[in-house]
Structures are given as structure tokens and as C-alpha cells.
Image (cartoon, rainbow, N blue to C red):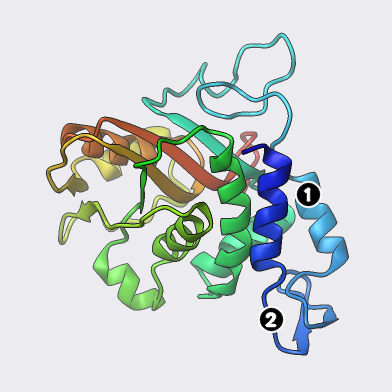
Amino acid sequence: MRPRNLWQRLSSALLGSVYPDDTTCLVCGESLPGEVLCPDCRKRLDALRLSGAVCDRCGHPLPQGEACPFCAVHFLPVTARSAWAHKDEARRLVHLLKFHQQAIAADIMARAAAEAAGEMNLCADTVVTWVTMPERRKRERGIDHGYELASRTADLLGLPCRQLLLRRDGRHEITQRGLDGEQRAQNLSGAFSCMPMKGGHVLLLDDVLTTGRTVTVCARALLEAGCESVSVVTATRAVDRKTEL
């Protein structure tokens, strides 16, 4: 399906949803008549979309004729795409979902993630999954933001969503936020396992791609369990070293 047609389909699926008559913009708080995002915030989100030339491997914005700056430092064993740069309104949406339990933010993020996934020529038998949270953190936050994003994205793509990754109890519960690449790798070492699989393709959803350490560990667990191939889609990604997560 062509990206523009997919965007129209996803827009009609969610932007046409019924919201209360008296609402405010989720991002800036402006009063709106039955809308979840104001026109200005939608316009700014559109400006943050990672469209145009991107790295075939990791999806990082790629100036014409230049080597990928992300792949020069990091290596992803899978193909990845992201919807937005992790800045401003897009970053705000991630925080609303992840730290403020605003599940409605997942609706907007899923719409963008589904469009990014639609450009990857996924197999018909693809299963969607997510990066599993530690149980303690899930209880503290009262929401599994990964599941909220993955399940909504799967619905838009018409694909099944299943929990394939298991978080090993009592270990690796330190948040990745604020850690550098080496610290992230050490923190996640041995953190995930996966039930045995017999081939098939998996689409792994996550909120943010920073160094790629988290999705790499998860993808390897899936592949070692017997999955044939893995693709990764995130709602946002860090596009420079100054990005504040």
C-alpha cells in the first residue's frame, strides 16, 4: 500500500474517532471542540516526521551522499524505522504515555508508527510484539506503555499482537533513561528471554530508539528462540547527541 493511501486510511480510523465535545489539546492544552490535537501541534508533529532519505538499515535521516552517522557508531542486527524525531511535541507524547499514564497518546503514536511500518513490506504472517516492562515498574506506573503502543499499531495494521518477550524476574530493573550505550548494554545483559518459536516474522514496537541497545537485545532473544526475522518500529528516535530523553 502506498504511504499516502495508508496515511489516509489511518487518519480516518483514528482522527475520525469520537472524542468528548469539551476537550483540550493533549500536547499544548488548548481548548478544542472534540479534537485531541490542535492544528498547530499537528503541524509541528508533521514537521518532525522522518520522511525523505533514510538509512536502509536503521532508518536514520540520511543527507544525500553521506554515510549513516548512526550505523557508523551503533549496529542493529535488524531493519528499523521510526516515525518522528524525538523532539518537542513528539517527545511530549512519549512522556505523556510513558510517565503520565495518558493512554490516549498511544493512539496518536500508533498512527504514526503504523505508517512507518507500512513502508517496510511486512510479511502477511507478521506478529507484533513489544519490549516487556519489569513487573515492578508496571505496577508503579499502572500502565504498560509498550503494550498500549503495540496493540494499537497492530490493530491499525490488521496484525495479531502477542507478548513474545519475557522479562526475567528480579533483574535488570534499572531504567535505561540517562545511560550511555555501554551502560545500556550492561544493564540489559540477559534481561529478556522468549518462548520457543517456529519461524515467522516479528515486528517489535518500542517508544524511542536511542542507541539501539534495547531493541538489539530483544531482537536477538527473538531470533535465538527460532523467529525467522525481526523488524523494529519506534514512535520516535534520537537524531543527535543532544537529544534529551
128 on left or right of 104: left
Quarter of the view holding residue 65: top right
The residue depicted at 42 percent of the width and 59 percent of the height is 146
Q: Position of residue 7 (x, y in %)?
A: 69, 49
Report the amino acid beneath label 2: Val
SS class of the residue under badge 2?
loop
Instruction: Identify the amino acid type marked 1.
Output: Asp
Q: Secondary structure at mark 1?
A: helix
Q: Residue at x 17, y 46 (%)?
A: 193
Classed neighbour count for the residue bearing mark 2: other residues with Cα under 10 Å, few (<14), some (14–19), many (≥20): few
Report x, y in % for residue 236: 59, 47
State left or right for residue 72 relative to residue 3. left
**Residue 245's spot in the image, x, y percent?**
57, 51
Q: Residues under labels 2 and 1: Cα distance? A: 22 Å
Q: Which residue is mark 2?
A: 18
- Residue in the foreground of this view, choosing between 223 and 65: 223
Q: Return the x and y of residue 182 as percentages of the image width and height.
A: 36, 33
Residue 183 appearing in the image: no
Q: Residues within 10 Å of mark 1 (few under 14, many from 20)?
A: some
